[in-house]
Amino acid sequence: MKSYKLNNEVEAFEFGSPLDTGALLEKGVPEKIHCNEEISLGKTTKLQFPLLPRDRIYGLGEHLGSINRRGRRFRSYCRDEANHTEDKNELYGAHNFFVHVKEQGLTGYFIDFPGEVVYDVGFQDDQKFTVEIHGKDFRLIKIPGNRMEEVVSRFLQVAGKAYIPPKWAFGYFQSRWGYKDLEEIKGVYERFQQEQIPLEGIYLDLDYMEDFKNFTVSKERFPEFGKFVRKLKNNGVYLVPIIDAGIKIEPDYDIYEEGIKGKHFCLNEEGAPYVAAVWPGKVHFPDFLQRETRQWFGEKYKFLTDLGIEGVWNDMNEPAIFYDEKNLEEAIDLASACRGKNLNVHKFFELKDTFANLLNDEDYHQRFYHRVQGKKQRHKDVHNLYGDYMTRAANYGLSKHLDKRFLLISRASSIGMHRYGGIWTGDNASWWTHLEENIRMMPSINMCGFYYIGADTGGFGGQCSGELLTRWLQFSAFTPLLRNHSALDTRPQEPYAFSEAVLENSRSIIKGRYRLIPYLYSTYMKAVENYQLFFKPLAFEYGGGYEEIEDQLLIGEEIMLAPIHKKHQSQRLVDLPERMALITVSEKATKITLAPAGPQRLSYDLDHLRFFLRENKMIPLGKSAANVSKLSVQELEVLAYVTDKAEHTFYDDDGISLENREKNLMKIIVEFQQDSYHIEVEKPHKELEVIRFTIIDNSGRIHRKSHEIKRKKSRNEPME
C-alpha cells in the first residue's frame, strides 16, 4: 500500500496498481499515513465499518431509496435500468463517494475504482457496513471534517469543480420520444407560443436521425434542419439532439468507415471489432478510453454545431446492449428446439427468460475489450468509465467548435464526469413514488459533484395525469435541469395536452420558474465556485434530529422546499426547524407571511409555487419572460425575512463565456435600524435600475421599499 496526502486534510491510500480513472485532479505527495479501516485484500477486496445504532451513511449518488442509505444494499455498476421499482439496487451512475456520520464525528470516503463495487449498508447485518470492491487495484480517499458540507467541500476540491452550463440551460425544455418530423417539432414550438408558455428548447430523441445513425439527420423527415435550428435560436429557443453510444455497422457510412480505419472500436477476444446491437441493429462501440478515439468522436459533434446546435444529450452509454450475436443465436436455437414441443411451466419460462435476458446481459461485458495505456483491458473491469469518457469526448468537441458554454447531459456517469456535463436520472415513470424518489435523489447526486441535474418531469414511461405533472413541475421548478420528457406510446405530456385547468396551472408554474432563474443561476454558480452544495436535506444543516425528514430540502443558504408528492392532497405536514417566511410566487404576484418553528400543515394549491425563506435571508426574483434571452435584471424584486441584518451576494455573468467570465457580484444589505430598514447595494449590476423590496419582520409586518440605483456620471456629463 502507498499513501499520500492530496492536501492538508484529504488522505489517499493506493492498493496494488490502480488505473488512473481521471476522477481526481491531482495525485498528491507521498508520505506515511496509517489506514485505520479494516481492509481484506484479495480478488474481491472488502472494507468493513462497524455501524452503531445512530450511525448514518449519506451519498452514493444516483440510487433509489432513502437519503440515509442505511438498511439497503447497493451495487455501483452503470446499468440501463428501465424499471425503477423500489427493490432495484443499481441505476445509470457509479458514484462511489459516501459520508459515514457517527455520534463522535464524520468521515467521507471515495473509492476510486472503475469496476463493480457493492455496498451492504447494514442490510445483511445491521451492525456492519461492508464494501466489496471487485478487484485489488484501487484508491481509497479519506476526508475528515466536523460538518457534512465541510467534508463534501474538501472532497470536491480534489475532485474538481462541476460543469457549468449556459444560463439558457436553466429554462424550460419540452421533449418526447416520438416527435417524428420537423413539422411536429414546429407544431410544438408554435403551440407553446400560442399558449404563451415560456419555452427554452426542445430535446430531439432518436427520431431525427437517418436510420438511427449518429451524426446524421433525416433529409426526408427533417428537411433544411440547420435553417430551422437557426430560426428558433434567433427567437431564443434551442434544439438539443440525442447521441447514442453505438455506431451502426454499414458500409459507406462515414463514421463507421473512419472508426474501422482509425481502430477506434472496442475489440472482441480475437481482436476484431466487437459486434452488439442497439437501436440501428448491429453496432460497434467506440473505445472512449483511448484518447485518440475521444478526440476523433468529439470532432464529430462539429456536424451538429455546424447546423447551429449548442446542446446535446448522450444516451444509452452504460453502454446499453439489446443483444450480441452469441446470445441471440443461443436463444434462436432454443426456440427452434422447442418448436412443436409440449412445454411445461419450467420449459416455458426458460424459453421466455432466455429472450427477456438478452437485454443488457452482463455476459456481454466479458466479451469485449478496450486498449488502455497500450494494454488490452476487459470491459467489465472498467465498465463504469464508459459513459463518463463518452461525455468527455463530447465536451472536448463542443468546447472546441463552439468556444462558449453548451448544454451537455449524459445518462451514464461516474465521479470525474461531473466536470464535463450534467445528468438526468433516466427512464423514470409517471408514478407518484418517482416524484418522491426525484426529491430524495437530488442531494445524494449533488454531493457526488453533479450540479446540473434533474429528472424527466412528469415521468418518462407510463401515463401521466394532469395532477401529477403539475405537482412534479412544482418541484422541478427548483432543479437546475427542467425537462418534461415522455416515451413513445405514452399519452402526450406537453402542458397543453391536458385540461384547460392543467394548462393554466402549468403556465403559471413555468412562468414562476423564470422569475426564479436569477436566484437559481446565482445560487448554482456560487455553489460551484465555492464547493458548496446546491441541495441539502435538513439533517445536513440542522443535525440528526431531522434525519427522518427527507421530503423537505434546502437550496443554497436561503430557501426550504416542501413539495407535495402524494395524489389528491392539497395540504401536507411540514416541520420547520426554525422560524421562516412562507413565500408564494406566481407569474406576477408574490405573497409573504410568517411561519413559526415546529410541525404545521401547509396548504399548497396547484397554480403557484410555495417555499420557505430562512431568517435573515433574502432572494431576488426577476420578471417572467418567454425564454432566458428575454430575461432582464433591470428591475428585481427582493423578498426578505429580516429580524436584524441580512446580506446577500447576487452573482451574474454573460451566461455563455467558458473562461474569464465578467462576473458581477452585487451585494445587497438590509439592516433593521430603529423600527425601519436601511438598504445598501454594493457593486450594483450594470443593467439594474431599481430593486423593489418586500420585507417581513418578526411580528409579521410587511415593509415595502423601492431602491433606485444611482450611478456616477461620466466625466463629460455635468453632475446633478
Image: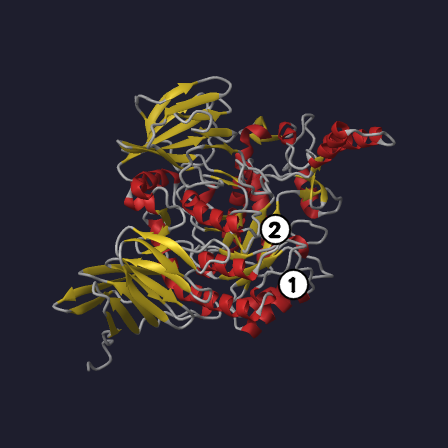
Q: Residues within 10 Å of mark 2 (few under 14, many from 20)?
A: many
> In the image, 5: left or right of 234?
left
Q: Is residue 5 above or below residue 505?
A: above
For the residue labelled by badge 2, is the local secondary structure a helix, a strand or a loop? loop
Expressed as whole percent of the image width and height from the top left, the position of residue 46 reads 45, 22
Q: Which residue is mark 1?
A: 225
Expressed as whole percent of the image width and height from the top left, the position of residue 375 reads 57, 26
For the residue labelled by badge 1, is the local secondary structure a helix, a strand or a loop? helix
Residue at 41% in and 59% down: 571
Q: Is residue 604 visible?
A: yes
Q: Is residue 479 above or below residue 274?
A: below
Which dot, 1 or 2, sits closer to the camera?
A: 2
Q: CA distance from mark 1 to mark 2?
A: 28 Å
Q: Which amino acid lies under the numbered mark 2 shown in the image of this protein?
A: Gly
Q: Which amino acid lies under the numbered mark 1 shown in the image of this protein?
A: Phe
* Residue 188, quarter of picture: bottom right
Residue at 59% in and 46% down: 315
Q: Nearer the viewer, residue 133 or 473?
A: 473
Residue at 72% in and 51% down: 211
Q: Nearer the viewer, residue 238 or 203?
A: 203
Q: Is residue 686 visible?
A: no
